[in-house]
Image: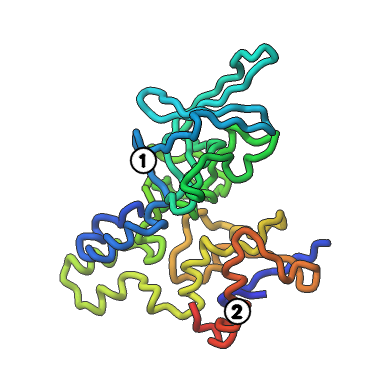
Amino acid sequence: ASVAGLTILAVGLAAAQADAPCAACHREIAETYARTGMARSFAATASGSVPPIDGGVLHHEPSREFFVLTALSEKPALQRYQRGFDGAVSNILEATLDYRFGSGNHAVSYLHRTVAGELVELPLTWYAEKGGYWAMSPGFDRPDHNGFGRKVTYRCMFCHNAYPALDAGADREEAGTRFPGRLPEGIDCQRCHGSGREHIDAAQRGAAPADIRRAIVNPARLAPARQLEVCLQCHLETTSLQLPGELMRYGRGVFSYRPGEPLEDYLLYFDHASGAGYDDKFELVSAPYRLSKSACFRASNGALT
């Protein structure tokens, strides 16, 4: 199968805000982008910004756990506890809400940073539906959920934030979990335009306008397949099931993809074989597949983006 020209192997199975240097010359674009969900995808949790839990406590019956919002060292925190046979509070665990994960357009999950520099997803999420409410985070609404132990990996961060500053080669491990002390806040300009260093240098030295333009990736000037891949780097998931859906090419770092390069040079995608009973599946991130099947896309001969 293919999406936007990507070869997908069939497996038969029964920026918060735009970067300041960019905003200096592209003020209107930067201000507009800063209001999008992608730009607000990740940020440090500000005191007073966490919505209250309705009634003050959330009881998760499947795990027999209770959750309340508290504070630790003047930071918002989440506390989990249980009740013994005599009703006494026991099994208390508390962690600060150091980062918010998600723009809030649909939901906001929270992360705790450990002393080892790892990020842990906390079990409660705020959902924007119905005027806003708290419930278990995705994948946590079960008796044996991960509690305060689900670590955020480099692959998780890849799609939810700008690239963190890591030492050369440190991102070769997809399941890496140690992050630098300072993290970017929100998906930035460079995720769709590539590195801006040469572009800025060309502008500062007064290069010809054509040379300045050539020094940055403008998705509008890419071929349609490459344009789509700028989005597909995060928005294509061939399957939510454990095939796996994708494998990183040997020798590539998690944060090494650059807009404009063929996406299949970075990731190798897998899917169920045609005719294996999954041809019309609808899963978690199926939008690219659904677009590629639409009458409009097929009639455009690949030009629709």
Task: Look at discs 2 and 1 and give the one toward the viewer.
Answer: 2
SS type, badge 1? loop
Residue at figure coordinates x 37%, y 23% from the top left: 73
Residue at figure coordinates x 40%, y 73% from the top left: 219
Occupied quadrant, residue 45: top left
24 versus 119 height, above or below: below
Q: CA distance from mark 2 to mark 1?
A: 43 Å
Residue 232 picture location, percent across and down: 52, 66
The answer to which of 279 and 61 lies nearer the viewer is 61
The answer to which of 229 and 51 lies nearer the viewer is 51
Is the residue marked by circle 1 packed among few (<14), some (14-19), or many (20+) residues within 10 Å?
Answer: few
Residue 105 picture location, percent across and down: 44, 53
Instruction: Residue at the far left: name it.
Output: 206
211 versus 120 height, above or below: below
297 versus 47 height, above or below: below
Q: Which residue is mark 1?
A: 182
242 versus 143 height, above or below: below
Instruction: Residue at the far right: name it.
Output: 14
Name the amino acid type tagged 2. Answer: Ser
- N-term-proximal mark, 2 vs 1: 1
Taking 196 as reference, is 297 left or right? right
Residue at figure coordinates x 43%, y 49% from the top left: 104
Residue at figure coordinates x 30%, y 57% from the top left: 18
Name the amino acid type tagged 1. Answer: Arg
Q: Which residue is mark 2?
A: 294
Taking 81 as reference, is 178 left or right? left
